[in-house]
Image (tube, rainbow, N blue to C red):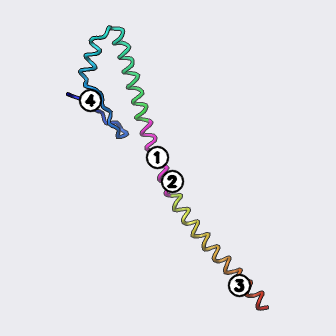
Amino acid sequence: MHQAVWQSRCGTRLTTGTPRSIVARMESMSETEAEISVQDLLALESRVEELINACAILRRENHQLRDKQQQLLVERATLLEQTQQARARVEGMIDRLKSLETGS
């Protein structure tokens, strides 16, 4: 049994039944039914393309968001370090002021 398998740009494997079964079903349909089916297939094809494009956009956005998250984590670590250094300096100044008060 042959199966038509497409690899989308999103990495998803789409599998359909054998092409012969689709052709056989379409041959047994009336002309109007076949026309509707062709229209349905074209609409489906269009929708699948839209989903593939949306998936590609979401993958790019996801990658950008992960990069931004990493940048923010680095920035946060830097800010925490700077805050700790500033706190230590302020505490040192307070201790020096207290020692000056008690020494006078």
Would you place residue 64 above or below residue 8 in this image? below
Q: Amino acid at mark 4?
A: Ala
Among the 4 quarters of the image, the one containing residue 94: bottom right
How far, Cα to Cα, is label 4 from label 1? 30 Å
> Contact, CB < 8 Å: mark 4 with mark 3?
no
| Residue 63 highlighted magenta (yes or no) | yes
Q: Residue at x 73, y 87 (%)?
A: 99
Secondary structure under the numbered disc 1 in the rendered image: helix
User: Which residue matches tag 3?
Assistant: 96
Q: What amino acid does circle 2 point to?
A: Lys
How would you rate the neighbour count of disc 4 (Cα within 10 Å): few for under 14, some for 14-19, many for 20 or more?
few
State how far apart marks 3 and 2 are (Cα).
42 Å
| Front-most of residues 14 and 49 | 14
Q: Main secondary structure of the magenta part?
A: helix
Under mark 3, the amino acid is Arg
Farthest-out residue, left: 1
Counting residues from the N terminus, which is met first, the one under dot 2 or under dot 1? Answer: 1
Instruction: Decide whether residue 65 is among the magenta residues.
Output: yes
Q: CA distance from mark 2 to mark 1?
A: 10 Å
Q: Position of residue 52 (x, y in %)?
A: 40, 35
Per the image, the residue denoted by label 2 is 68
